[in-house]
Image: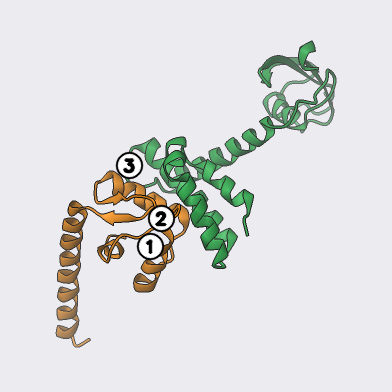
Amino acid sequence: MLTSLAGGPKPGYELIKDIESFAGVSLGPGTLYGCIAQLEEEGLIEALAEEKRRRPYGLTPEGRKILRSALQQSSDIAAAGWLRLSGSGG
Amino acid sequence: MTLRWLHGLIHLHPRRWQSRFGSETSLLIDEMLAEGEGAHKIALDLVGSALSVRARRLTNSRFAPPGLASLAIVVALVVAAMLQTSSLQPLSLKPGELNPVLVREMHAHHADHVNQVHWSTVTIKGARCQVGIERDNDLDPGGPLVTSKVTICIPDQHS
């Protein structure tokens, strides 16, 4: 969800479609708002002003920082994985 | 297409969650249905979400407890929903009438006793009622309850 919001604020349905397009994961409404509630509580995302009954959500500076850190960690793990695979002849 | 029962599943969530995300979730459900998403898939997700939110509140943990605890919460949610539904129906019981659910419950509690009237006090629509069960088959004391006499006394204002 943080990755999706890194591309700009989005309301619920746009978030679902975007996450589906790059992660292949289809979230339901309950899961989506459960996740939003948790991230909002942790101060990583924030609700923006409502537009046409739809409330967009955006990354907070803290959310951006956490995303950078998480992506870096994923990238390090992926690099280590590729290295080991190539070393073992895979 | 709007399916009212699907929107009703939002009410399985805690009140605070409902007031914060209820209308947004409702709108999202409509959007997903309009895009051809399956109602059952959405329903399962909503039930799962309610379970997760409530479990988190109960355990004060980020993650829902697995296994039996989750199952217990699902059962509790379903029972709560059933009770809520039944409480919306007008009370039609009169003295002497039988409420199958009540009778079944009473049987379960007093199945071991024979030839005795067991009185229990229960609350129906806010009124304290006396429910008496008499088991009259003593042929096989340890066996299943074959016949019984059930009396329900309900105060006049509720009869």
Name the kind of residue labelled 1 in the image.
Answer: Leu
For label 2, the residue is: A32
Q: Where, by quadrant of the figure, is residue B143 drawn? A: top right
Q: Nearer the viewer, residue B67 or A44?
A: A44
Query: What color was chain B assigned in the picture?
Result: green
Residue at 53% across, 41% down: B11
Q: Is residue B76 above or below residue B67?
A: above
Q: Nearer the viewer, mark 2 or mark 1?
A: 1
> Counting residues from the N terminus, which is met first, the one under dot 2 or under dot 1?
1
Residue at 16% across, 57% down: A65
For label 3, the residue is: B61
Q: Is residue A25 left or right of residue A89?
A: right
Q: Nearer the viewer, residue B157 or A55?
A: A55
Marks 2 and 1 on same chain: yes
- From the top left corner, tell me how far across and down residue B146 is, in percent: 83, 31
Q: Is residue B54 visible?
A: no
For mark 2, does the 10 Å Cα neighbourhood hold few (<14), some (14 to 19), or many (20 or more) residues? many
For label 1, the residue is: A15
Residue at 50% across, 53% down: B27
Name the kind of residue labelled 3 in the image.
Answer: Ser
Q: Are marks 2 and 1 in contact (CB under 8 Å)?
A: yes
